[in-house]
Image (tube, helix red, strand yellow):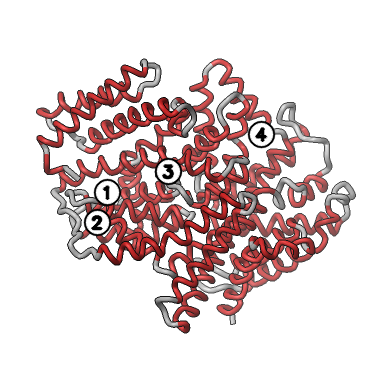
Amino acid sequence: MLTALRGGLAACVVTLPLLWATEWLAPYRSFVTLDQFAVTVLAFSLALVFLTPRAGKVGWPRLVMALLSLGVGLAASLGIESFALRMFSGDPDLVLLACGLILLCLVGCYLVTGWPMTLLVATFLLFGAVARFLPAPINAPPFELDTYVVYIAFGGDALVGQALRIVTVVVVVFVLFSRMFELMGGTEFFARLAIMASGKGPGGALKVAVVASGLFGSVNGSTTANVVSSGGFSIPMMRRIGVPAHQAAAIEAVASTGGQLMPPVMGIAAFLMVEVAGLPYREVIAAAFFPALLYFLSIFFQIDGLASRHGLPPSDQSRADWAEIGRDALRTAIPFALIVGTLILMPYAPGHGAVLASVACLALAATRKPLTTLFAEAARLTVLAGITAARIVVTGAVIGMLLGVVNYTGLGVAGALAIEGMASSQLYLALIAAAVACFFLGLGLATTAVYAVVGTLIAPSLVAFGLPVIAAHMFVFYCAMLSMITPPVAIACLAASGLAEASFWRTSFMAMRLGWSLFFLPFLFVINPELLLIGSGFEIATTVVCCLAGVIGISTVIGRLPIEREGLLWNALLAGLAVAALTHPLPLVVRVMAACALLVAFYKDRAQHPSVTS
């Protein structure tokens, strides 16, 4: 009975956004407002979260909360159009409904994200309640407490606000697409593609894990979920060839984190950026290309040194059926072509591309599987998609509450003025302050939640004092992703170390070493906007060459640590040339000369050490 109920709720959570995102059904949307739709999806999501415990059985308290979620959510959906007019009325029924929805979302947040996020939102709510007694610029309007509660629930830019709308309209459909992509065998193809792309060098087997995890993560939309899924085969593979447990876990953690930065999907962050930043989709994925390339190249060149120290064998590509890989590549390209094509032709309807891609995945899967097996697997994966989507929807609702407090109290304006004041005297100080804020706001959140928070709270502050819109939004997104591999939270490392049965702290410190470029890249592409394709063709080409050479040089040296005495001078030369190639204040001609000298040094280095050639 309970299993059937969970399945029905999961189907509702994914089916309603699927129907809403289908542009062919757009004429029927006029019967339901967007806020009514979002609150209805939230009601089903809350009920599903309460009925889906991570361990143990569902007790009567959870059953009661699930029923309350359906009742409160559906009641709010039916009356939400009139709530704005009744906000200052103090009607007991409206206040009670708002309190019930807020409390249910907080409990759901605790079940989904744990106490850190719940405590953060609760602290913000308490701050908002007393903000009317505080001095400017963080004071709030002199509303009564009952008005404040109603505003946080139904104010239009709070719980039922932009974050919840984006998640229910766009993100949920892409969660379903990721499961349908798995159904058609896309994840298996990625594993073979990783083998093809990784090379035959001693680090080839590790690069297989990096590429596969990165590709999975780009579609998955959650770093932690990606670690658990792709890490299930990549970590044992690395352990079998002799990689220590904490290093295998760290490689999986940084690769899964990088998947969220890899276009064209970027763990669904690209589509959120289109909505929040108001940028064309093609501009977002084009700007994301070179930073993601630098990130993965930095991992690859560190792996060369790691593999050489451990004496790891090359990856085995002798069994690769290249004809089959080519056919599968064409099949796999169809869903992505539909997504990209739809977003270019219909930029106002990002979810419609995911609908078409999901249907295409289902049709492609039907060419290889019996219909009975196909329907059974599709039903199972739809339920899993619904459970994942429900967790994201609940998170989006509590993020909306956080944003509602920020808008209500003027905290966002105060933060923007503070960062802008820093920028007037020192740009780097303002960027560091914004990076620290993004790091703390990203603690414990999934990718979609990370960007929803920092993209609305921090990015406008950076745009206000002159940063290009794409640079500001990419900066805050990269900085927020730091929390995935940085202790004490480091949720990607926590999941990976659990799979590898390794020390969390050793895994985290190794992940910070392998992912060093993630700490550096946000500042690099703000200082060098050419990496985001801002500038002339000549400026972009020369800057990209200098940055590629510099990142590869530093990564090569880091990968060889600790360096033996006889190699210190040579590696110091490589590091010096890399720093010169990356240093923006130096004249461009000096940076280009340093990059060229570095390429010559690489050629000589690889000639002397053929064992590390990948």
Q: Position of residue 79 (x, y in %)?
A: 83, 60
Q: Residues within 10 Å of mark 3 (few under 14, many from 20)?
A: few
Q: Is mark 4 on a helix, strand or loop?
A: helix
Residues at marks 2 and 1 touching, judged by CB atoms closer than 8 Å: yes
Residues at marks 4 and 3 touching, judged by CB atoms closer than 8 Å: no
Marks 1 and 4, how far apart at CA: 40 Å
Residues at marks 2 and 3 touching, judged by CB atoms closer than 8 Å: no
Q: Which amino acid does label 2 sit on?
A: Met
Please give the residue where the numbered disc 3 appears in the rendered image. 488
Quarter containing the C terminus: top left
Residue extending farthest to the bottom is: 372
Q: Which of marks 2 and 1 is in front?
A: 2
Picture disc at residue 191: none
Of pointers 2 and 1, the one earlier in the residue sequence? 2
Residues at marks 1 and 3 touching, judged by CB atoms closer than 8 Å: no
Q: How crowded is mark 2: few (under 14 residues within 10 Å), some or many (20 or more)?
A: many
Q: What element carries label 1?
A: helix
Judged left or right of residue 417, residue 593 is left
